[in-house]
Amino acid sequence: MPKLSQKKCQWNVQPATKEYSAQLPSHPNPRNLQYPPKQTPVEELYRRYKDPHEEMIMAEGMSRLCTDLDVDPQDIVMLVMSWHMKAATMCEFSKQEFFNGLKALKIDSIEKFRSALPSMRSELKDKDKFKEVYNFTFDWAKEKGQKSLQLDTAIGMWQLLFAEMTPKWPYVDQWCEFLEERHKLAIPKDTWNQLLDFVRNVDPSLSNFDEERAWPCLVDDFVDYLKEKGLVQTT
């Protein structure tokens, strides 16, 4: 430790500091020292939720995110969020999906994330955006490596989506019952996509149902099921 002269410095802080510094040994330029880069707010969010063993957010991280957002994991807003993230798989966000999604949504904090939820939910009221979310759901919800959507998953997704649809489809319960009674197989993408066209364009009374149109066989069978059960609404 360098020794200072009381007389020389006369307890004046400024010259004392200057003399002390002059007696210190020289060191390398501090600018050459390596410091870990400071994380951005989005990086901090990602690190909070990422899996400890994988470079992605998985089921446990998604559950933690839902807790921080005060949202039920089965709330449809999580589906809309995944659509914004362009997520490839249910209950997972890759690092790129998470970063790109939050950038597009202009979110960099959990508070902004929470504030964005009502806007995401309201997007389902837009007819075109609803269709985009609906079509997105098939690939998002199916198991990796599979071409079709497992029946129980498809039924769950239909119940979730059609509950938000305006106007309501009066046959959603009958559709699910029909599948469980008569079909019991996975749902192909063509059936998934065309069902929304059927729901939106065919009157509940089936008065404008065109039997000559190339509907999926499952839709034709459902129309027969409604007639058989006497469930067709008439005007």
Image (tube, helix red, strand yellow):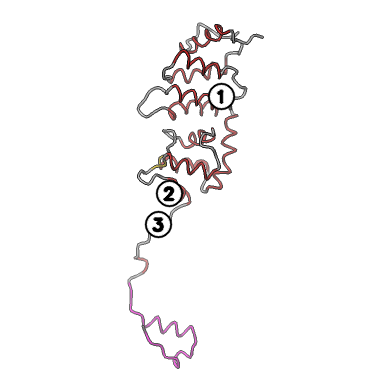
Could you say where residue 140 lies in the image, as x and y percent from the top left?
Answer: 44, 30
Name the kind of residue labelled 1 in the image: Phe
Q: Amino acid at mark 2?
A: Arg
Disc 3 and disc 2 in contact, CB within 8 angstroms: no
Residue type at mark 3 is Pro
Residue 67: x %, y % from top left:
52, 43
Q: Residue furthest bottom?
A: 7
Q: Per the image, is 19 magenta?
A: yes
**Residue visible at 49% across and 23% down?**
155
- Residue at x 48% of width, y 25% of height: 135
For marks 2 and 1, the one nearer the N-term is 2
- Foreground: 89 or 18? 89
* Relative to 165, residue 1 above or below: below
Which residue bears the numbered disc 1?
162
Residue topped by disc 2: 47
Badge 2, how many Cα within 10 Å: few under 14, some, many 20+?
some
Q: Which residue is mark 3?
A: 37
Q: Which residues are magenta?
A: 2-27
Crowdedness near tag 3: few (<14), some (14–19) or many (≥20) residues, C-alpha within 10 Å = few
